Image: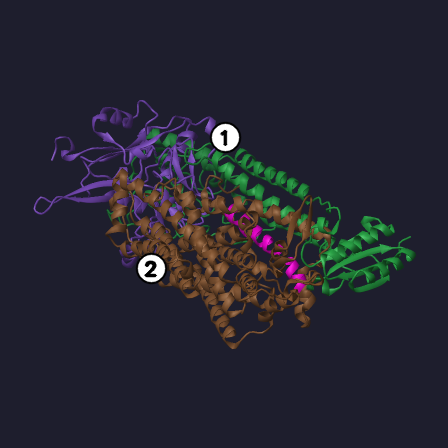
Chain colours: A purple, B green, C brown
Amino acid sequence: MVNDQTSQTLPEHKWTMVVDLDRCTGCSACVVACHAENNVPIVNEDQVWRGRSIHWIHLQRYWEGDYPQKQARFIPTMCQQCAKAPCEPVCPVYASLHSTRQNLNLQVYNRCVGTRYCENNDPYKVRFFNFYPPRFDPPLEQQLNPDVTVRSLGVMEKCTFCLQRINRAEQAALSEGRALRMDEVIPACVQTCPPSALMFGDANDPNSPIRQVINGNRYRSFRLLESLGTEPAVVYLKGGEAHGGQ
Amino acid sequence: MANYLVLGLFEEVSSAAAAIEGVRRIGVPDNRVSVMSGTPIRSKLLGRRPARNWLGLMSLLGALLGLGAAVTLLVGAPLLYPMYQGGQPLIPIPPSIIITFELTMMVTMWVTFGGFWLLNRFPRFGRPVYDPRITAGMIGVLVEADEGRAGRVVDLFKNGNAADVQRVVARPQIDNRAWGRWLAVVGVLLGLVLIIAPLFVYDVIRIPFGTQMDDQASVPYDGGPRLAAPANSVPIQGPVFVSDQPATQPVPANPNSLQRGQVLFDINCALCHGPKGDGNGRLSGFFTPKPFDLTGAPVQALSDQQIFTVISKGFGVMPPLHENLDVEQRWDVVDWVRNLKK
Amino acid sequence: MAANEAHLPVWKRPLPEDPRLARQAQQLREEHLNLDPRPPDEMMETVMRPTTRAPLAFWLIWLLLGGGVLTLGIVWLIQMIGCIGIVGISRPVMWAVYIANFVYFIGIGHAGTFISAAFRALKISWRGPISRAAELVTVFGLTTAALFPMIHLGRTWKGYYLIPYPNGRGLWPSFHSPLVWDLIAITTYLTCSTLFAYLSILPDVAMARDRATIPWRRRFLEVFSLGFSGTEGQWATLNTALNVFTYALIPVMFSVHTIVSWDFAMALQPGWHSTVFGPYFVVGALFSGAAAVIIVLALVRKFMHLEYFIRKEHFNGMGLFLLILSLTWAYFFFNDYLAPWYGKAPADVALSMRFERGLGAPYWYLMLFANIVVPWSILWNRRWRTSLPLLLTVAVFVNVGMYLERINIVAIGLGINELPFDWGVYRLQLPETLITIGAFSLLGFLFFLFSRLLPIIPVWEVQEGQQEEELRHEGAGMVVTRGTGE
C-alpha cells in the first residue's frame, strides 16, 4: 500500500542514482545483474531484431566521428523515477503510480492491462512490454529471485531501483528498531558495477554518501531531458572530454 | 357519459381543421379530441393548442443526475482511495471537467429516451382505434363523445370530406395493466442484475480465475528442490554450500558463542525441539512429523552449512528464521546444536 | 390553376398551361426533392421494396462480408491465445494499426452526427433523405471502433478494469488518463447515437408496420415500433426528445474526437504534443466522415434504386461540404506543420525529415495528394461535383488519405522520439491486415443487415420537409399554400 499506517513512522526517502559517465566502461555488467536480480526475461533473436528485447538498464550507445577516430559513447539508462512522471497519469488503471514516501514510480504488474500508453508517454523509453509470456526453461527457473514477481504476458515492466531490496532493508531496520543504514540498500546494478560508476542512496539524508557525491560534482552533473520537466531522480556526471578528459 | 369513439380520416389539413372546429362547436371538449398523423402537423394549422409535454423537465432532471454521478465519481473515488500519479493533484480540474461534461450529457440523453417511453406509455399494449391509412398520409381525428353527440360528429365528418368514418363503442386505448406488467418485468430484471453483480464484484461468489501471476515460476525460499550453484560461481555474503568441502564456521565455538547460542536456542527452538534438543518440546505433539531430534545421527551428520540453511530457510513445517536471527546469531545457534551432541 | 384543384396534393395537380412556366415547374420538381412530393404509399414502397427483395449478388456479397467478420473474430482469438506478440508493434512503436483504425472508425462517424444533428439544428433543407444513412455510418462505425481498444490490449480479458464500478478491492480507473476519458466519451457517443437513430426511425417503422404483409416482418416491426400511432402527444414528445438529442449530441460529437485526439496530445511524444490536435482531429473526422457518407449514399442510391430520394442536390451539398472540410483540414494541417518547422526542435526536425524524405515519405505525400490536391481540383466545379463517378472517386481518395493521416501520426510518428537510440520502425504483420479487413467487413455487414429489415430513408422527415415547403406564415397564423403547382 502506498499510504499505509507505517508511513507516519517511516521517513520519506528520495532515492537517487548517480551515474558517473567518466567511469563507465560500457561493460554491461549492470545489465546482466539486473536480469539476474529482477527475473528479466531474454527474448529470442527474431524478437530482438524487431526491437522487443527487455533490458531494464541498458547502455545507450552513440557512435561519434569517423574511422579511425570513431568513438562510442555510453549512457547507462534505466527508469529515471521521475518526480513528475509522464508515464503515470496516462495509465487508465493505476498500474503506474507514484509512491509519495519512497518517491519512486511504481509498476503494479497484476493491474496492468497492457494499453502501453505509459511507454508512448515515456520520453526515455525505459519501459518494456512482454509481448510473449517469459520463458524460463528448466533449470533456469531456479535462478529466479522469489522476491520479484515473474511477469506474465501483456504486462509492462521497468526498473524499480530494486524496490525489493529497499523494502527488505527497511523491514530489517524496522524489526531491529533502528534507523536504516545507507550501505544496506544497494540495487543489483550498483552492487555489480566494476568501476563503481553507479552510486545509489537517499538524497534526503544530508549525511548520506550520495548527497556528498551530488553536492561535490555539481560542475559536471546533468539530468536526461531536463527541459521536459519530468524531474528525474537519476543524476549523470559528465565524463570524457566533456570536461578536459579523453 | 362518453361512450363512443368516432375516427374520421381526412386527406388534407384544411378539411381536418374544419372538422375539428366543427366538433368543438358541437360541444365536445378539446381533451376528448385527438389527432393522429403519419408526419407531424403543426397544431396551429389544425387550430389546436400545442400538446403540453414534460419531457424537457425530465431531461433537465437527467442532467442533474448525470452531474451528480460525475461529481460523486470524481470526488469520491480519489478521496476514498487516494493514489498519486504524475505530480497531478488527487482531483485534477481539467480532466474532471471532461468527465463531468460527458457523463452529464450521457445521462441526460438516456433519461430523455427513457422519459419518452414512459410519457407515451411505450410499448403500447392494447387495441387502440387506429387505421393504417394514417401512415399513408391521412389525418385521423378521433373523437370521444356520448351517444347523441357521436351521431352529430359522424354526420359532420361525412359532410366534411372525410375519406372514412368509423364509430365504435368506447374502449381504453392503452392497456395500462399490460404496460405495468412489462415495466415490472424490466424492473425485476434490472434489480436482479443490480443484486447479483455485486456478489461477484465483492468476492461473495468467488470464481477462481487464474490471475496468471499466482503461480510463479520462481522457487520460493522454503520450497525446493533447488540445485546447488556450480563451485565458486556466485559470490555471496553468507554460507556457501559446496558439497564435499569441509565445514567452516564464521563464528568459532568459543564459550561466549555457546552461551549466546544456548540463550537463543531456549528462546527460539526449545518449544518444539525441547530444551535438550531431543525433539520433545512442549509443542512437539502438535506436529506431524514431530520436530527432529537434534542430538541424534541424522541431524548431527549434516554439515554446519546445512544446519545453518535449515535454520535460515526453514524445513517443511519449521518456519524460516532468517528474519528473527541475524547471521552471527544463527552461527551461535549452530555452535550450540553441535554442542548438544555430546 | 383552377380553384377546385387547389386542394389536390401536388402530385395530382396538372402543370401550368404556359410552356415556360410548365418547364420551370418541371425542372424545379426534378431537382428538388422537397418540391416533388409523391403519395406516401409510393414513397414507402420505394423504400421498403429492397428490404423484401434482394438479388443473388446481395447474398453473395453479404456472405463474403460475413466471412470477413468471422476472420476478425478468429484472428482476434488467435491473438489473445497466441499472444499479442504476433502483431507488428515493438518498442518504441507501441501503438500502430489498431489505434489508427480506432481513430479512423470513430472519425467516419462524426459526419453522420453532423448531418443528422447539426444539419437539423441549422435547418438545412436537403438533409432529409440522407440523415438516416449518415446516422447509421455513425452507429456502425462506432460499433466497429469500440472493438479496437479491446483488440490492442495486452491483457484483453482484464479490460474491465477500465470501467468505473464499485468493487471489493476499492480500485477505480484513473480519471487522469485520456483512455478513461475515451471510454466515457465513446460510450456516451455510441449509446446516444443509437438511441437517437432509434427515435428518428420510430415513425418510419410505424409506416412500414402498417404496410407489412409478411408475418414475421410484421411482428418484428410491430414490436420495434412500440405501438407508435402518431398522436399529437407522441409527436410532441418525439420532437422534444429529438431536440434534446440534437443539441446534446452536437457538443458531444465535437468533444468525442477531441478527446480521442487527446490520447495523442497529452503525450510528450514529438509530433503528438500539439495543442492544435483537438480541432485538427475533429475537422479530420468530419472530413473522412463526409467522404464515407458520400460513398454509402452512392451505393445505397444505386443498389436500392432510391433515385427518387437521393438526388443531385444532395450530392452537390455533400460535395460542397467535403470541399469546405478539405479547406479547413488543410488549414489545420498547415498549423500543425508550421510550428515544429519553425521551432526546429531536433526531435521535431527528425520527425519531419522522416515524413518528407525518409521512409514515411510515400504515405505522407499520398495523404497530401488525396486530401488536398484531389478535392480541390475536382469539387469546385458544380458539374463534376454532381457527377457520381467523379464524386465517388474523390470520396474514396479522401478516405484513403485520412486513413493514411492516422497511420502517419500513430505508426510512423512513434518511431521518432527524443533519444535517437530508441528510434524504431514499424513493420506491418498479417494479423493486423486481416483484422483491418475484418473491421471494414463488419461495417458493411451491419449495413447489409440493416437494409434487410428497416427503412434506410427517413420518409417521415422527407415528408415533413416537403410539407414545410407548402407552409407559409400569414400574420400570426400559418396556411398551406398551393405549392409548386403554378
- Disc 1 designates what residue? A5
Q: Position of residue C456 (x, y in %)?
A: 57, 63
In the image as oriented, which residue stretches furthest toward the bottom?
A: C56
Q: Is residue B194 magenta?
A: no
Name the amino acid type tagged 2.
Answer: Leu
The answer to whether any part of residue B235 appears in the image is no
Q: Are marks 2 and 1 in contact (CB under 8 Å)?
A: no
Q: On screen, A133 above or below B55?
A: below
Q: Secondary structure at mark 1?
A: helix
Which sits in the foreground, B119 or C470?
Answer: C470
Q: Secondary structure at mark 2?
A: loop
Which sits in the foreground, C3 or B108?
Answer: C3
Q: On screen, A57 above or below B189?
A: above
Q: Position of residue C343 (x, y in %)?
A: 27, 38
Q: Most prominent secondary structure in the magenta stretch? A: helix
Give left or right: position of C462 versus C70.
Answer: right
User: Residue at point 59% right, 52% down?
Assistant: C196
Q: Chain of mark 2?
A: C
Which sits in the foreground, C284 or A40?
Answer: C284
Which sits in the foreground, C242 or C437?
Answer: C242
Q: Residues within 10 Å of mark 1 (few under 14, many from 20)?
A: few
Q: Which numbered circle lies on residue C254? A: none
Q: Which residues are magenta?
A: C183-207
For marks 2 and 1, give the one nearer the viewer.
2
Same chain letter for marks 2 and 1: no
